[in-house]
Amino acid sequence: MPLEAGARIGPYEVVCALGHGGMGEVYRGRDTRLGRDVAIKTLPALFAQDPERNARFGREAQLLAALNHPHIGGIYGVEEDGTSTFLILEFIDGVSLADRLAHGPLAIDETVAIARQIADALEAAHEKGIIHRDLKPGNIMLTADNQAKVLDFGLARAGDAAGSSASAMNSPTLTAAATAAGVILGTAAYMAPEQARGKAVDKRGDIWAFGVVVFEMLTGARPFGGETISETIAAIIKDPPAWNLLPDDLSPPLRVLLERTLQKDPRQRLRDIGEARLALDQIATSPAPVAMLPPPAPKRVWREAVPWAVAVVSIVAAIAMGLRSTNMASPGLPPLTYTISTSPEPLDRAALPAISPDGRHLAFVRNGALWVRALDQLEARQLTGTDGAQHPFWSPDSRQLAYLQANAVWRVGIEGVPPVRVAGYRFPKAARTPGGVWLADDTLVFAPAAGGTGLFSVSLAGGEFSTFLAPKSNVETDFHRPSLLPDGRSLMFAVDHVSDGADTIGVLANGTRKNVLTIKGELLDSPVYSPTGHILFHRENASPGIWAVPFDLSTLEATGTPFLVAAQGSYPSIANTGNLVYCENSVTGLATLSWLDLESAQVTSATTGRFPSLVYPRLSPNGRYVAAGIHVPAEGLAVIVVDLQRDTHIRFPADVRTAAGPWPVWAGDRMVVYTRSLNGTQQLIGRPADGSAGEVVLTRGMQPTIAAGRLVFARGANRNFDLFHMASPHAGADPGTPQGLEQSPASEVGPALSPDGTLLAYSLGNQGDTEVILRTYPAATGRWQVSSGGGATAVWSPRGDALYYRTVSGALMRVDVGRTPTVTLGTPREVRRPSRLIARVGYDVSPDGKRLLMVEEITGDAQRGTSVTVAQNWFAAFRK
């Protein structure tokens, strides 16, 4: 609630409100003990329960306490009333520099005096390793005698002022997720180019912002124009500053200082703000030229566009608004890409971003809830009542979202309309890439994308889902991520083939279905129509990334050859305006194997090998070898065996149709059993771990587990899988015929036998909605539920005294298992781990039980999938 005049906060009395912003509400107060005026700052009620905002608020107090400087607004203390926290700050009787500049530019000598004070304040902060990250006129107060005070260190970060680390924690953002990796923070007009590109920021970002502020004091205008955030960012990245606006009588030393602070390449920029302070001292006291290095020669940006078009533009995808031609992008807009964030954790498939048809909003799932971010605003908003949301998609008018939640489809307005249940949802949720579309006639069409399902529809008014488009019998299996063509009625989709290793992009228009593009040995996904006259789509195997193919809307036919647009980009979503968003990296990003110490949470390398899409690592009983799945471009999933002692590996042949798995396990130390597709069905394969002999087909099934001479596995089709068992192939006897073990209307998958073979854990439910169940083996004389609130991927400790599993949100849990005299289960406890260690693709426990072997995903910043690229006018780079 707003504070009323006369309210007391400890010894401080509220006098009146001073203002409010995104980071807090500020009141004038009176210190009744010391008889002085103070400023009282508190979080707005809307954000009082937001852990991220509270952390940023507390960080501001700590940083201000570390700074005692005449040109930095000070802090007197922190007060709490049980529900809110208040910062008691120095009251500065004056106006902001922004208010002064609203009346026009300052005189040159006044500018030099104020700039010198700002530089002095920044120097003091940088010497303590503190980077402001949001310097702008609105955060600078001027007293009646023109003394400058730098305020608002709420976005500052204590760290390496030299900028030697590219840590994600130093990365700025335009979103609420200020600590996320590879994102943009601060006010757009004052961002350095590296900030605008979503890269790590160090003290040179403050130096750039300082240059922008000085330029604005001298001219009354900013050096980079733009009516929107996108236009401003584009100008910062590609345009020179508007030097022609500088006063004619500006001294050469001051102009040189500005040019040094506004170098786009941070390596060419002024290295230390202290140099600027010294230069300003000399400018103020002497007319003689200041001894500063001249600015480096400007780079010929567009001359360098040839390699950029091949490299950087391959990471750019965007479409200009208002295109007049279906084959030409707007010549007035250059390609532009910038990065925003949705969460400090990697996105899972249920959280793939979706841009609204009007191009103004981005929807995504963060921390299990639905969020919306207006692309011209700094903050994302959580939509109330959407906990557990998955797979959001937009209404044609861009005002509502449909999504899955629990066992139903819901819709919610982005401006205050509460969630409304539409219909029950009976399909599996743990699929490759489900998705839906909202037709112009208020019909929802959804692709469950698992178990051989097609497309299903339901009216927005409610009812039951009915088949909208079935797969071709014995030819096709799953449909993925449908999208709309411009008429709002015709659909585009990707569909898997059963046995020939091909995926197809198809359309359904006016009741007629037509295949647009088929590529053998590929996984195709997320086709979307671009107003440039192309289909953009995700390609998984050969040269993974976002690709485009020319497309004729009138004939519904591809009219050219596919070409790569964004290397390692994935899952595009496009607006009617042509604005495009996509995940930063493809699911075929490189990964390695690392050890997680369960006591210290420290991570150490298990191998120097780097592999594409590393999944399901399993240790041999002696702990020396690891069997895992990898994704081989243009082939499919293969099995590798890594020798951890010699740091070498061998690879078994790939299977072009296994879209998941291959779930390898060890039959002793010398044989690997895994899953591959043969003749359209999943088969269990045995092969010597050294590759000395060929494959042996054991039986039909998948997801094997082996212990104490027994083999348990899943077998089934569509959405119903049951558990079977037989003798292990290394037991020295004929394994015999598989026998049924667990059979029910729900699916039983992911079996895990305890090391002594007396207990069996498995996942029970409808794939995405599963719980980990424990039962005695082979006879089910006892049964217990292990997980709470969803779980899968059960793995035993070597002594059988603990079970590990992952939750729906990706958390890794441990449950202690007792055996005397009967089975007892402990409370699930989360395992601490860095976010780059991915639990959803499998893990294993070391023979001594002290470490977990996990997949560590690798990109330039050691993470992927944490950020989203927003792009416009992508085809401009390919016009020639």
Image (tube, grey):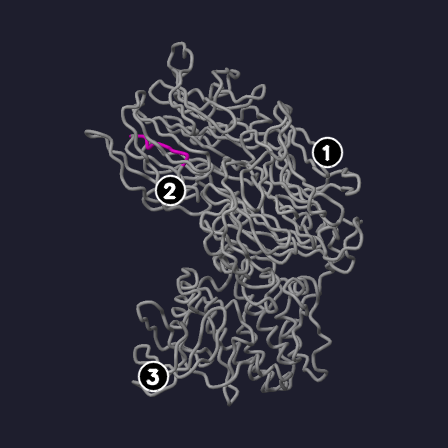
Label 2 crowd bin: few (<14), some (14–19), many (20+), radius 10 Å: few
Which residue is nearer to you in this view: 862 or 629?
629
Image: 855 above or below 136: above
Secondary structure under tag 1 reads: strand
Question: Which residue position is annotated with label 1?
Answer: 514
**Residue 371 position within the rendered picture, expressed as x and y whole percent measured from the top left:** 51, 55
Q: Which residue is mark 3?
A: 31
Binning the other alpha carbons within 10 Å of mark 3 as few (below 14), some (14 to 19) or many (20 upward) gives: some
Query: Please, is residue 424 above or below residue 382 in the view?
Result: above
Label number found at residue 299: none
Q: Is residue 67 visible?
A: no
Q: Was residue 795 drawn as part of the magenta stretch in this picture?
A: yes
Magenta: predominant secondary structure element?
A: strand
Q: Nearer the viewer, mark 1 or mark 3?
A: 1
Where disc 3 sits, the SS reads strand
> x, y (%) of residue 446?
58, 40
Looking at the rendering, the stretch of residues picked out in magenta corresponds to: 792-799
On the image, the x and y values in percent for residue 829 come to 32, 44
Disc 1 to disc 3, C-alpha distance: 75 Å
- Tell me the element at label 2: loop
- In depth, the one of 593 and 365 nearer the eye is 365
- Asked whether the viewer can see residue 655, the reply is yes
According to the picture, the residue beneath numbered tag 2 turns out to be 789
Residue type indicated by callout 3: Asp
